[in-house]
Amino acid sequence: MITYLQIENLTKSFGDLLLFKDISFSVCKDNKTALIAKNGAGKSTLLSIIAGKESKDSGDVVFKNDLIVGYLPQNPILNDNFSVREQIFSVNNKLARVVKNYETALASGVQEKIFEAQAQMDSAHAWDYESDMKQILGKLKINNLDQKISELSGGQKKRIALADTLIERPDLLILDEPTNHLDTEMIEWLENYLKNTRTTLLMVTHDRYFLDNVCNFIIEIDDNKIYNYNGNYSYYLQKRQERIENLNAAIDKANNLLRRESEWISRMPKARGGKAKYRIDSFYKLKEFASQKIDTRKVEIQTGMVHRLGNKILEIKNLSKSFGDKKLIDNFSYSFKKNDKIGIVGVNGCGKSTFLNIIMQTISPDSGTVEFGETVIPGYYRQSGIVYNENQRVIDIIKEIAEVIVLGDGRKLSASQFLEYFLFPAKMHYSLVAKLSGGERRRLYLMTVLMKNPNFLILDEPTNDLDIVTLNVLEDYLNSFAGCLLVVSHDRYFVDKTVDSIFAFEGNGKIRNFPGNYTVYLTEKEEESKISKIENPRSTISLKPQPSRNKKNFGYKQNIEYQQLEKEIAELESEKKEIEIFLSSGVSDIALITEKSLRMEQILALLDEKETRWLELEELKELDSK
């Protein structure tokens, strides 16, 4: 098998913090490889070193010659002075330059430039590249290519960086938490895309469904040792458990042998030491092996007893919220019952986080009320986390909340003991926050929320940056949690394991209250979609021309018309939105209102005509590619 990447004796530390030492592994062609390790083990740093973005202390990173490598960091840095279009076309390869030239020619409207750019596209066989690019941008909902990078949210920047990386068509794709900031629809598309592409993959992710469905090879870093598993995540879990059981058995056996050898060592006359040197050497090797301690500790979350909830928990009545002409919540009502565990799902931007912020009264609704019962103690874990003082010590953050913490079994722990309980070893207690990894910061934040003993937990994307070990334990904790739970998460596995019902944000303000977990909800939606297609077949199909499958119909002229239509439709949509804003602005000039209304009718007619023609060309294009 061809080796694309070879890591040899790699070491990295930050001051006195050793991340990894003398680790070696390889990534082979066509493998979809996942890297698994605990938070703080340096996964992101390792990927950054491999991508050449960060220095190593020692060791070698060796790529196959002439390999194109694409890298998506966990927190990508883009050029704020670029537009989205400029960022996308900043990819430095021949196909990207040809497509960029073609897009520029189309925008100019000069036929000679368009014909010349068309010829370059044909010569470079760039049509498939352009088609892939449009598909990737569309699926990641990157629509406004003229928007400045500086105007985008962190999630939008992550999606553009992901599109940028995929469009490059690298031989080796390195992805650090690619599903962060993606909604479920995008994650499922990315999952299928990576599963079906020939690109070799090295990835860090906490999304276990994604991991299981995409990856066929697992590399685990545990206690500075490398373990390889030739299978998916489910296979890894099984074989890892077998490895630990076998190692424990070997250590037990070594300890039994060590007791006998210790007796021999103590009885052996000093004068015979030279004769039995080989056995003495073996004794010390055996002693070293038998003294191994397998770190099977895990975060066991047991905060204090949950305060009893009264009859009134949380009443939401006739809640509505819009931003401009975008309706997020439309007349929604719900009364929470004891032990309600509800997941909130929907595409990005549909209003999930807004809904939580209205509940926590950090955003006001347009109408409706939100009332907590008197016995409710909410705990709110925000998606954005909290901003720490980078120069503050870890232990001081805990002490600011409480010097003594009471656990669920009645035990009392000091702030220092509580940190160790959450796998922050003593040597880290007086470390500065600046030295913590992203996952360690999230774990610290989770501690600060849970140690206040809430009986109504509101969690907004709690799975981001947590390692899989911590996620498993958090799931166990939520399953035994005696209060109410309201959670937003794009992690399908996490939602399936922790909730009993769903608030599904289905668009235009509609929130569907669905009894069952997320997988059950998706199954129901698929069935509804099938029934809808049977009962309401699209009448437009019979109106479209049916081209012959034996003849190529999407040629030179059709492609120019297709691209021009896309541009014209976008311009008409923009003008339509401007008129809609004008008509809803309260202007009282009747003549101007009449003029704009007439123009709106013209735009709607033109859009109908051009979109129909665009659909015809789109079908011709698909048939031509078969």
Image (cartoon, grey):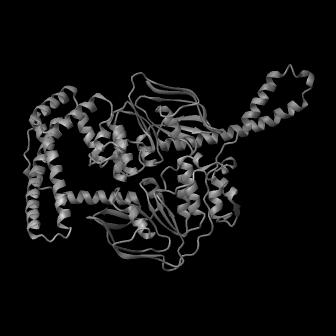
Nearest the eye: 133 or 34? 133
- Quarter location, residue 59: top right
Residue 58's place in the image compared with 512, above or below, is above
Q: In the image shown, does 497 or 6 lie closer to the viewer?
A: 6
> How far across and how far down the image is residue 414, in percent?
70, 60
Q: Name the spot of residue 397 as percent of width and height, x first.
A: 62, 58
Q: Which image quadrant: the C terminus?
A: top left
Q: Quarter of the image containing the N terminus?
A: top left
484 versus 57 height, above or below? below
Q: Quadrant of residue 120?
A: top left
Count of numbered tags: 0
Residue drawn at (23%, 38%) of the image: 131
Decide if residue 328 is in sight here.
no
Report the front residue among 579 and 475: 579
* Location of residue 319 (image quadrant): bottom left
The percent position of residue 182, horizontal first and vertical second, equals 38, 50
Q: Is residue 618 left or right of residue 425?
A: left
Q: Going 8% across and 44% down the picture, which residue do you hit? A: 546
Q: Residue lying farthest front?
A: 589
- From the viewer's perspective, tell me whether residue 415 is left or right of residue 613: right
Asked whether residue 283 is in view, the answer is yes
Determine whether 272 is above or below 333 in the image.
above
Residue that sits furthest to the top in the current view: 275
* Relative depth, front residue between 433 and 311: 433
